[in-house]
Image: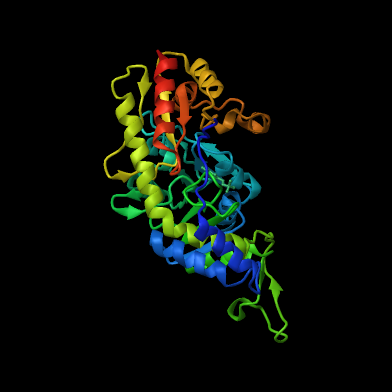
Amino acid sequence: MYIPYGRQSIDESDIEAVVNVLKSDFLTTGPAISTFEEKVANYVGAKYAVAIANGTAALHAACFAAGIGEGDEVITTPITFAASSNCVLYCGGTPVFADIKPDTYNIDPADIERKITERTKAIIAVHFTGQPCEMDEIHAIAKKHNLLVIEDGAHALGAEYKGKKVGSLSDMTTFSFHPVKHITTGEGGMIVTDNPKLYERLKLFRTHGITREDHLLKKNDGPWYYEQLELGYNYRITDLQCALGSSQMEKLPNFLVRRKEIAKAYDEAFASCDCIQTPYQKDGCENAWHLYVIRIKNGKRKEVFEKLREAGIGVNVHYIPVYQHPYYREHGYEQIYCKNAEAYYEECISLPMYPALKEEEQQYVIQKVLEFVS
Ligand SMILES: *Cc1c(COP(=O)(O)O)cnc(C)c1O
């Protein structure tokens, strides 16, 4: 038996949706893409959506659309997947790390404020584990200093901040549809925005910087005509993937309910154990529960982790502070130290969390955690 920390849920209707595309005229850049984009945009409450090759490409596109370039600083959290700051480097900008809050593990608005310089252009807020960041505070800082706000919502499809869905709050929000995330397209991602100018730039970036849209062309030689206006990439997603995505969106509400149930069962099981700190939930934040992270408070994290892996439980650590990676250390980050992020990293373990996790599997995980921690 092996219980992973996360995995997809695929049913017959998902398979049928993909097979139907295989039998259709378009395998890529056909009608399934805009259908999926509309579904996600409507669900999160955004005007525009651009489906793209993966969540990392979504972040890259968002930084491009935001105009990030050489000399620009973008503030983000170290407790995230490296893509949240790599996207800034792709554009020639400089990621700056603000520490996390010790309770939510999300970026600390007060430390964002401390890290702002005259070069700061944007903030990338990551809703870690699916719990929304303190967006009112972040927006207030952004307004004061004239910054763009990008949300990395890879953990947070379906999460809510003060009654509003993540994706409806900031200049741009990105999502990932990797199989461990809330819904999957195999590989896939999306950017949502309410801003028509950003929307145009995101679409350009997805297809080499090339457009056929009349209102964007500098001239028009005829019906064959297109122009490359920017240096974009081939970051297209396929119709096969988007058909799967649309089918998965139908199940998202149930997936979220199941994730919440699993979180509650873990909370209850560990409530009376002094050695385990369960995730703190902030008022007004509805967690989408991509991850369930416990902290081992008795100094035995490594030992507990190793024993859980030996017991067939695919626990994980999310995340190593990004600036600790050799690439970052070799590129100017060797002196960076975020105190709360380091303390968190010493103690964290992500437990299995996905809708298809069976009740008896969760009971086994709980039993083993309690056994190994004591
Ligand atoms: C998964 C993830 C990404 C990247 O998504 P991919 O689709 O794997 O490229 C970016 N940021 C965070 C926080 C993630 O968890």
Image quarter in which the C terminus is found: top left
Q: Is residue 264 above or below residue 307?
A: below
Q: Is residue 132 visible?
A: no
Q: Position of residue 189 (x, y in %)?
A: 55, 54
* Image quadrant assignment for residue 204: bottom right
Q: Is residue 233 above or below residue 145?
A: below
Quadrant position of ligand 1: top right
Q: Nearer the viewer, residue 3 or 122?
A: 3
Residue depicted at x 66% and y 74%: 25
Image quarter in which the N terminus is found: top right
Taking the image as shown, residue 197 lies to the left or right of residue 132, namely right
* Image quadrant assignment for residue 275: top left
Q: Nearer the viewer, residue 144 or 86?
A: 86
Q: Is residue 111 above or below residue 9?
A: above
Q: Position of residue 357 (x, y in %)?
A: 44, 39
Q: According to the image, what is the colour scheme of the structure?
A: rainbow
Q: Position of residue 262 (x, y in %)?
A: 37, 37
Q: Residue furthest bottom?
A: 222
Q: Is residue 174 visible?
A: yes
Q: Position of residue 74 (x, y in %)?
A: 53, 45
